[in-house]
Image: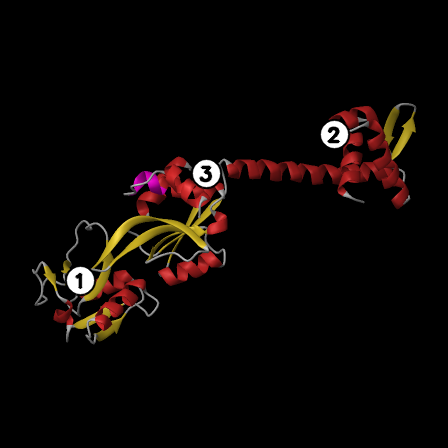
Amino acid sequence: MNYTQLRAFHAVATAGGLTKAAAMLNVTQPAITRQMKLLEEEHGVALFHRRGHRLELTETGETLYSISQRIFGLMTEAEDFIASEAELKTGKIRVGADSPYFILDILAAFKDRYPGVNLTVSMSSANDLFRRLREFEIDVAVVTAEQLDHEFFGVPYTSLEMVMLVSEGHDLFGREGIYLKDLQGQPIILREDTSTTRRLFMAALEGAGIEADIMMELRNQDAVRAAVQAGLGMAPELVGTPRIGERIHRLKIIDAPIICNEYIACRRERFGMRKVRAFFELAVDVGPFSVNFDDILNAYANS
């Protein structure tokens, strides 16, 4: 039995006749008759009693019709679900972020506009977020990067500059900025090896011929900030706007400014998904973009 045969049978059983069934499926009556004949002959069963122009289901036909009702009912349910998800009335979007500070406004705007869509958020390092995008574990990410590999599509959400964080009791506290040479001999607190911030910072020190005195490595930036605030050392951080209530002092790096971007990014082929585009569109609405969403669509089309 193939789908065409089952669809023809279901239409005849529902309509109670060949002519009405043909009209339901927008095909000719001979086409319906041929499919019914093939179905019965191939399986050696009788599905209808033919009483003149009227068809009545046999016992076998009744059982098959009960099954076909469930099958086509589920297909209708699936079609309704897909249509609803395409309109973002239901469904799920999986978001990744390497910092809570850049994503919260987007999440709030998305939930306000699409309340029926379930949001799941994973906080991780930039390196892990790109891995998870590659492996389809998340749909879109707000992530720090110098640039994106070709397999990803994205737009800069905001520009980030590296600063050094110090506590109020640190001997460099109160200065406007520092030079890289000022970091010689200072205890430094860093993220793990895969951290974008760490990679950029270490490259800058190496370029200046300075050896970092790494006294602690921590797994997330909140832990790094807590360690700095406790007076355990200095730490590099990529920052955008000041944070309300911040008790840590920021020092600009005067002689080697380090700039990169926070991106909204996804796998290139997944940008066509309605929910992913909707996330990009809201990011444009709430973020400090200098482009509009049409510019992003054009950039994707030409990439």
The structure residue drawn at horizontal position 53% and vertical position 36%, both measured from the top left corner, is: 84
Amino acid type for the residue under numbered disc 2: Leu
Q: Is residue 2 visible?
A: yes
**Residue that badge 1 annotates:** 165
Amino acid type for the residue under numbered disc 1: Leu
Which region shows up in magenta? 283-287
Upstream in sequence: badge 1 or badge 2: 2
Q: Position of residue 206 (x, y in %)?
A: 24, 73
Q: Position of residue 60 (x, y in %)?
A: 85, 39
| SS assignment at label 2 | helix
Q: Quadrant of residue 44?
A: top right
**Residue that badge 3 annotates:** 116
Viewer-side label of 2, 3: 2
Upstream in sequence: badge 2 or badge 3: 2
Please determine whether, in this image, residue 75 is positioned above or below residue 190: above
Upstream in sequence: badge 3 or badge 1: 3
**Gap in Å between the C-alphas at discs 2 and 3?**
34 Å
- How many residues crowd around disc 2 within 10 Å: few (fewer than 14), some, or many (20 or more)? some
Q: Position of residue 182 (x, y in %)?
A: 12, 70
Lateral position of residue 89 relative to residue 191, left or right = right
Name the foreground residue: 144 vs 249.
144
Q: Is residue 102 visible?
A: no
Which secondary structure dominates the residues rendered in magenta? helix
